[in-house]
Amino acid sequence: YAAARLRLLTEGARSGPPRRTALAELTDEWLTGLFAAATEGIRGGVSLVAVGGYGRSELSPRSDLDLLLLHDGADSGAVAAVADRLWYPVWDLGLALDHSVRTPAEARKTAGEDLKVQLGLLDARHIAGDLGLTSGLRTAILADWRNQAPKRLPELQELCAERAERQGELQYLLEPDLKEARGGLRDATALRAVAASWLADAPREGLADARRRLLDVRDALHLTTGRATDRLALQEQDQVAAELDLLDADTLLRQVYESARVISYASDVTWREVGRVLRSRAVRPRLRAMLGGGKPVTERSPLAEGVVEQDGEVVLARAARPERDPVLPLRAAAAAAQAGLPLSLHAVRRMAATARPLPTPWPAEAREQLVTLLGSGRPTVEVWEALEAEGLITRLLPDWERVRCRPQRNAVHIWTVDRHLIETAVRASEFARRVHRPDLLLVAALLHDIGKGWPGDHSVAGEIIVKDVAARIGFDRAEVAVLSTLVRHHLLLIETATRRDLEDPATVRLVAEAVGTQGTLELLHALTEADALATGPAAWSSWRGSLVADLVKRVSAVLAGDADEPEPGAPTAEQERLAIEAFRTGAPVLALRAQTEPAATDEEPAGDPEPLGVELLIAVPDQPGVLPAVAGVLAVHRLAVRTAELRSLRLPDDVDDGTVLLLNWRVAAEYGSLPQAARLRADLVRALDGSLDIAGRLAERDAAYPRRRGWVAPPPRVTVASAASRHATVFEVRAQDAPGLLFRIGRALEDAGVRVRSAHVSTLGSNAVDAFYVTGTDHAPLPAEEATSVARKLEETLRA
């Protein structure tokens, strides 16, 4: 058996369902032989039964063998001996075994107490022994399941919901559990159990193929790892894709996501139908009593032209004619989202089968219904998924196909591209009152990342796509121009606010030139916040919001002609005090204090302030090496830098005609408590005079911790931002955040002989995105060739 099993698993020609079935048949044959030898001379009824996945003949290479030794209770001692003769050969081969020994009565009793046991027995399959014993148990278990369905199905639904809460949604996870996550193999098994209850059934179209694809991926995962694992880890995805003859890991994930989406949608529809049937059963006796035994009349409430509500779902009116009304799918979807109700599966399928395509450009009603759907908030998601499940979205927006189920290999993003776009529209709907053209905001939110399905910069590709899509939807030329600008520059505000010096007039002018008008700026501001909120929790905070708002205010002033160049921000009283003290003492001074978000405004509800970490304010006499010294000391003390700003501050005229470097940073302890300010200052003094070997300390600490195998981050990238400033050369650094990263950058810049005029550092999830404004020894921007050379050397340093 072991040799035959190995040959079967290493045959390249046979895979998928044929291999799983062949493996089950081979195992059946082997166990039948073991059973015959083990039961020789045994009196009484005994049978060997496969349950669970093995019962369905779905054996993956490392699947457990789920076996039940069923007996009539006549000779329990002999049965125990049979069990030993069966189980030990399985264990000797190193196969995982889930086994039990029970009479039919014990099996039924255990199933009644344990839902998971009952689900396994629903797939019971006879292998050897007394066929009548097995058949009797199968009949009894199915009868029990159908009789108890009104009680057990809600229990099964709760079990599925708890698992989904714990494991997440398979269709969005970068390292999904193919079995346990929502939309995975467990949910597919639950749908089989619902169908077996005869109470409701799942949508069949595509369900079997989705389940088969997930099983194929699990087979490949078992073969490539040699382990009984269901988690598709990042480091295994390329090998699994190759095993399945797929192009790459992204193609693999897209197939997994598409399969999970089919199963998730089928689950939603099925559990909704279960709830409807159970409610109907509970209400019907009372209605019959009230109506004297007559048949109750189904209520249908109109929602829109051709659209009504019935039994908690949105269905088509009896007079609706999708074949004559091309706007009906959008009208029904908008009505459902506005009412917060699901679209009936039958209605969606009827519209998908019979509705005519919309003319080009779309009629005004179709455009208005799309905007209504997008502006309906959270209910939009479920309605959109119903349309997408039946292919209506790609029929309305053909370009959607390229972003559908497309993974985003970025820890900051928690959604696939298509779901992120819908989430952005949901978020943008919250800002509809802040802008003069909410329709343009919502459509821009839906399409802002549409270019991610194309090669190159997705913003540039998206600008081209949205011009065509917006024209087809029916927007006029001016509106198309605004939408294309929003898509092209949807990252402009957040990137500028967190990576550029807002005190530099060139920065504000560049943004103003790109945006063009006050109306577009207003829309871009709202889109920026919606996009960040829809990305994930690491992408937005009140701090980032305040930076973007500050930039918008400055750009607005330029667009309105109120200011040619913004005045530099005046130092606070505390900053000025520290600067004067540092200049007079010739040594660094610092202040540490807890930092929280600004208090809520009249437009925002009051609540507990959001903690931002600890604000570290440092003033140092202007001298070389300040940036790497401060960053190094913080790294030595295990303080993570969340944001950092460095700038030169000129002292008041009545003090002296000198400058002091002012550093305003936000830090957080990696673990443990924060060090005392006096200790930080002492180490900073030593770092500046060269008596503290920061590089050595950090190297020692790195050597003490072994490198962990895991995801390999993309290489760092250093670019020169041309035209970002008239007064300095701007280096933009993008790298994986790590302890000591800012120290290495600062030291590399110092070694290059440049002076850092200001720095703007931010951490987005695991990514560091930093901008450094530097000059030469002559206090002027670097020549182009020298800037390129410094950028290349800095990048090489970070790659080492």
Image (tube, rainbow, N blue to C red):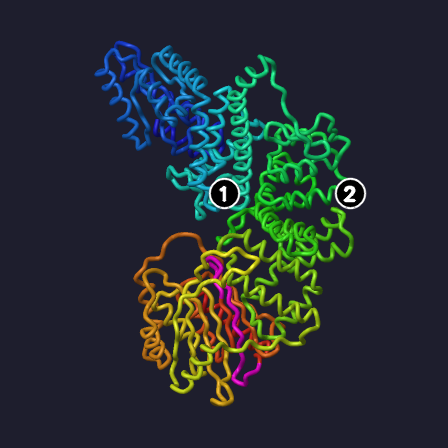
Q: Residue at x 38, y 37 (%)?
A: 228
Helix, strand or loop under label 1: helix
Give yes or no for residue 696 being in the magenta stretch.
no
Q: Residue at x 54, y 75 (%)?
A: 773
Residue 551 at x, y percent in the picture: 60, 67
Quarter occupied by residue 435: bottom right
In the image, 99: left or right of 666? left
Q: Which residue in the protein does label 1 denote?
A: 242
Helix, strand or loop under label 2: loop
In the image, 202: left or right of 82? right
The quadrant of the picture occupied by the N terminus is top left
Disc 2 residue type (three-letter): Pro
In the image, 68: left or right of 603? left
Quarter occupied by residue 360: top right
Q: Which residue in the protein does label 2 denote?
A: 363
Can residue 405 be seen by looking at this rendering? yes
The quadrant of the picture occupied by the C terminus is bottom left
Residue sticking out furthest to the left:
77
Residue 165 at x, y percent in the picture: 44, 40
Disc 1 residue type (three-letter): Ala
Using a 10 Å C-alpha cutoff, classify the residue at mark 2 as few (fewer than 14 neighbours), some (14 to 19) or many (20 or more).
Answer: some
**Where are the magenta residues, as a range?**
762-780
